[in-house]
Image (tube, coloured by chain):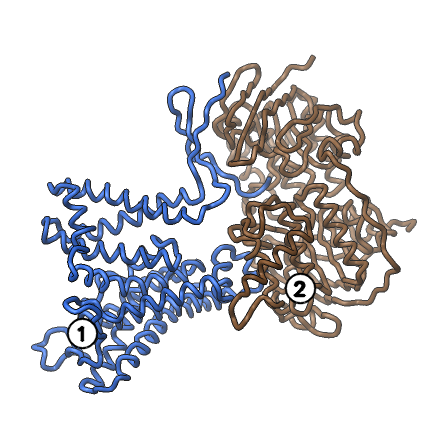
Amino acid sequence: MPEALLKLTGVTKRYGQTVANDHVDFEVEKGRIHAVLGENGAGKSTLMKIIYGVVKPDAGEVIWNGQPVDIASPSMARKLGIGMVFQHFSLFETLTVTENISLAVPGTKSELTERIRAASAKFNLEVEPDARVHALTVGERQRIEILRCILQEPRLIILDEPTSVLPPQGISKLFETLKVLASEGIGVIFISHKLEEIRALCDTATVMRAGRVVGVVDPRQETAKSLTQMMIAQDVPPPKARQGSARTAPVLTVSGLNHTPLNPYAPKLNDLHVTLNSGEILGIAGISGNGQDALTRALAGEIRTPPETVMLDQTPIGMHGPDRRRKLGVHFIPEERLGRGAVPGQSLAENAGLTTYHQGLLRSGFIRRAARKERARETISGMDVRCSGTEAPAQSLSGGNLQKFIVGRELSLKPRVLIASQPTWGVDVGAAAAIRQKLLDLRDAGIAVLVVSEELDELLEICDRIQVIFRGRLSPPVSVSQTDVDHVGLAMAGDFDGLVAADG
Amino acid sequence: MSGWQWPVISTVWLPPMARFVLEPRDRVSAFAPIQVALLALVLTFVGGGLLFAVYGVSPVRGIYAVFIDPLTTTYGIGEVLLKMAPLLLIAQGLAIGFRAQVWNIGAEGQLILGAIAASVLAIRFDGTTSALLLPAMILAGMVAGMAWAAIAAFLKTQFNANEILVTFMLTSVALQLLYYLVTGPLKDPMGFNFPQSISFGSSATFPLLIPGTRANASLFMGLFATAAAYIFVRYSFAGYRLSVGGLSAGAATYAGFSSKRAIWLALLVSGGAAGLAGVGEVSGPLGMLQRNISPGYGYAGIIVAVLGGLNPIGILFASAVMALVYVGGDFALLSVGVPNAVTGILQGMLLIFYLACSLLLSARIRRIREEPA
C-alpha cells in the first residue's frame, strides 16, 4: 500500500457564481504518476493552483505527508517540496541555462553547472548548461523548467499540459524522464486532455467534470472512449464526409514572403510560399513560436508586405490592412479570443461589429445599433453560443463559447478565404467538433480554408494538404494521404525531407 | 482556464468563523460608477471634516461652508456655473482621449494657447462692433489648442514619444510664451507696464447668463460639448473605434483600426476643447489676457474626467462638484478662515478616494463562512 503524499478532502472554490471546485477529494501517492483529466473549465487548473498555493480554497482540507497544511503561497509550496512546471515558461531568453536556474536555486555557478549536468544525465534531460535560452528549442526550454524544479528537490511535481508544446518525438522523451522521477519516489501530477498519453504513462487518473471529481480510475484499464464519456458525459459526432466532389482552383497565393519581427528572438520568416485553393483545407503544422504568428498576420494584413507577395486571385493585396482585405473576402480567426478576436469588456453586440461594420452596420459614420444587435443575435443562435444574451460581456463567456461566437461572426460575412489560427485550442470537445464541422462545411461550399494548428491529429483529420513551419521556414505541401503523424513529426523538428512517407 | 487569474489580494481573518475575500464581480451594474462616485464624495466629506478639525473648525461647519454655502445665493450659483464651464469643456475632451488610452495631461497648456489666439484677434480688432469677432475668436482658440496638442500627436505617431511627457512639458513652454506676450507684444501700451493686455470690448466677450453674477454664455460651449461627446461615444463609428483601441490594442489591430488615427483624433479633440476653455476665460471673467488665466483648470479637468467615469453624463455632474469645491474653498477662506490650499486638498481627496473605490467597480468583498471542520 503506497503512502499518500498529498491528500485533499472536500476542497471547494467559488469564483462568483461559478463553482470551480466542488467538494473535490484528491490523493497522490509517492512514486506514482497521477493524471488529472478533464475538459477546459473542468476545474483542473484551479485544483493545481490550490495545491501550489496560488489560490486559497473557500473550504476543505489539504493534508501533506499526514499533516494538515495551509499552503498560503507558491514559495511556501516549494518549501514543502511541491514543484510546478507551467505550460508557459518563465525563462530569461538572454541568460544562460545555468543563470536561469540560479535565480531559483542557491549555489555558486560552477556548483550549479555540475548539478545540472548530473541531473541531466540521471533524468535523461539533455541540456547544455552554458547555452543561452534564446537559441534553444521549446523542448529544451521545457527541460530547463523541469531541471529547475528537480534541483529544488521536490517530493511532488505538477506538470500542466506539458506535451502541448512538444513534437511527437519529444513527448516520448519526456515520458522517460517522468518515469525515472517516479522510480525515485517522487509523486508526479500530469495534467492533460490527451487520452492516449495518459493511457501510455499514468498509473492513476482522476477525471473531473464541471468542478467535480467524476471518477478515479486506472487509465490502462479504460478505453479512450470510456474516458471521453466520463469527461464530457456525451457522445461526439464524427465529422461528416465530403459532400460532392472537390473542385479546386488557386485563390490566395503567397510567394517569397520574408519578414523580420521586432522581437529579436522571434523567428524570421524566410522565403515562404503558399498556394491556397478553393474547396480545400490547407494545414500549417508546427510547434508554436516557429513563425506562425507572423505568417497569419501577414495573411490577414496586420503585417504589410510588398503588394505582389500576397495575391488574391490575380490582385496584389500585400499592401492592404485587415479591414481592406476583409472587404475583399479574406477573413481571419485569431488564436487569442479575448483581447484580439473580441474586446473583453464589451458586449457581444458591440463585438459583433468589430469586423463586420462595413457590411451594413453603418449609416453616415454612425453605428446602426439595432442592426448590430440583430447580427449578434443571429450569430448566437446560428452557432448555439451559450450566453446570457447580446448584452453579455465577451469575457463572461467560456473560451469555447466565445470562439463559437467569433467563428460565427467571421462566417456570417461569407468569406472567400478563411484563415484560422488554433481554432479549437482550449475549446471543449463538443465545441471543437462543431467548429471543425463548420470548417469542413466551408470547404464543401468551395471556400479556401487555411488552418494553423499544433494539434497534429486535428490537422490530419480535416486537412487536404499540410505544410510544416519550422524556425520561420515552410516545407512544401504534402497531401495528407501521403504522410502520417510520425513523418509530420519529423518535419516539425526541422527535417523537411522526412515529410513524405516513403511508401506513399 | 488559462489567462489572467484573480490574485488573492487580501484575506482578512476575523474571529473564528468568518473571513472576507476580494473577488471579481460577475457583471458590473450600470449604477456602480455612480455609487462609487458618491462613496468617494462621502469619504471626501469625512476626510475634509478631519482636515477642518485640524484647523480648529467644526467639521460640519467646514463641510457646510464648502459644499452648501455657495449654493444658497444667486452669486454663489453663478460662480459655480462660471467655473463649471471650462472644467466641463476640458474634461469632455480629455475623456475621449482617455477612453482610447491617449493621456493628454497638458490641457492647461492648450488652454493657454487658445486664450492667446483669441486675445490676438480681440486686440487686433479692438473697437469693432462686428458680431463675427467672438465666433472668430472661438474658432481661433480651438485651432490653437488643437495645434498645441498636435505637436504631441506628431511626436507620438512619428517617434513614439510619450504623450504624457510631451503634453506636460509643452504646458511649461505655453506658460513662458504667455509671460513673454503679456510683457511684450500684447501688453497694453497704456497699462502702466502691468503684464496684461487691453480690456476687451463687448463684441469680444461672452454675454452674461444671470444678471448680478459672472456666469456667462461660455457655459453653452460646455453643454454643447457634452451633447456632442454623448453622441460621439455612444453612436459614432469613430467613437467605437477609439474605445476598442483603448480597451484592447490587440483587437483594434486585428480589426484594422489605425492606432495613429486614434492618437491624432484623441489629441486634436482634447486640445481643441481645452483651447475653447481658454477663450471662455479671456472672453469671460477676465476680459483680457494676463499672467494668470487659469487656476489649474487643465489639471482639475483630468480629475473631473476620471471622477465622471469618462462618461459624458457623469462628467457633467463631476464638473459641477469640482466647480463647487473651487468656489466653496474661496467661501471657506472667508467664512471659516481656512487657507486656500484646502481647495486643492479636497480635489485631491476626491480623486484618490475615487481611484481607491473604483476597485469596487470590478470586484466585490464577500464574506466566507467557514464550514465546521
Outermost residue to the top = A1
> What type is the residue that disc 1 sits on?
Gly
**In the figure, B351 relative to A39: above or below?**
below
Letter of the chain that mark 2 sits on in the rendering: A
Question: For mark 1, does the 10 Å Cα neighbourhood hold few (<14), some (14 to 19), or many (20 or more) residues?
Answer: many
Residue B217 appears anywhere in the view: yes
Residue A111 horizontal/vertical position (percent): 55, 30
Count of numbered tags? 2
**In the figure, A126 relative to B106: above or below?**
above
**In the figure, A10 relative to A331: above or below?**
above
Residue B163 horizontal/vertical position (percent): 39, 62
Q: Secondary structure at mark 1?
A: loop
Which residue is tagged 1?
A: B287
Horizontal side of residue A302 vs A439, given as left or right: left
Which residue is tagged 2?
A: A258
Q: Colour of chain A?
A: brown
